[in-house]
Amino acid sequence: MRPDYEFPISGTKSTILTPATIKDAEATYLTRAEAARLKLDLDSVRRVAAASASAELAKLTPEFVRDDRGVILYARLTSDSPATASAVLAPDFAAKFAATLGPDLLVALPNRYRVYVYPALASKFQDTAPLILRDYELSPYPVSKEIFRVTPRGLTAVGSFETQ
């Protein structure tokens, strides 16, 4: 089932964005009728989403996964909040990882509760395909099997773990 109020992501084959509210650890999608009733336009939805994403990002502590030489391969953000994956939409997301992963980032969002963050340069994100696919398939709330580049304008899909 797809929500009736959704926004496309550039380059994606199947992933969409949809506004939701979180109450008592439950996500409720905003409908087109509710958005009209509340007189919400796309700009106001984006402003509220950005502020909410920044608040969510502030609560998360990255876990860095390193190779045998101590080089950071990726960061993992995990929490019980159904808004965890939305943290990638925070305007300050890239800045949080710039010192450790560089300014260009790729992200995987296998479910609501987990985000994988990779450096775009010299990344070996394909090596984590089994983790991403497992997190997606075992979750009651899967998000995507695609990999996204974080840009100042939002997310852009650049591939899929499904074809790895």
Image: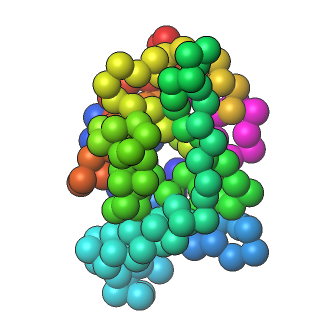
**Which residue shows up at 34% across the image and 62% down it?**
91
Quarter occupied by residue 15? top left
Outermost residue toward the top in this view:
164
Outermost residue toward the bottom in this view:
38
Quick one: 146 or 13, which is closer to the camera? 146
Above or below: residue 33 compared with residue 116: below
Secondary structure mainly formed by the magenta segment: loop
- What residue span does the magenta drawing correspond to? 136-145
Q: Position of residue 145 (x, y in %)?
A: 52, 30
- Total numbered labels: 0
Above or below: residue 56 compared with residue 123: below
Quick one: 87 or 163, which is closer to the camera? 87
139 falls in the magenta region: yes
Residue 82 falls left or right of residue 104 = right
**Which residue shows up at 55% across the image and 52% down it?**
85
Quarter occupied by residue 70? top right
Q: Position of residue 10 (x, y in %)?
A: 27, 41
Q: Position of residue 161 (x, y in %)?
A: 50, 21
Quarter occupied by residue 84? bottom right
Above or below: residue 18 compared with residue 163: below
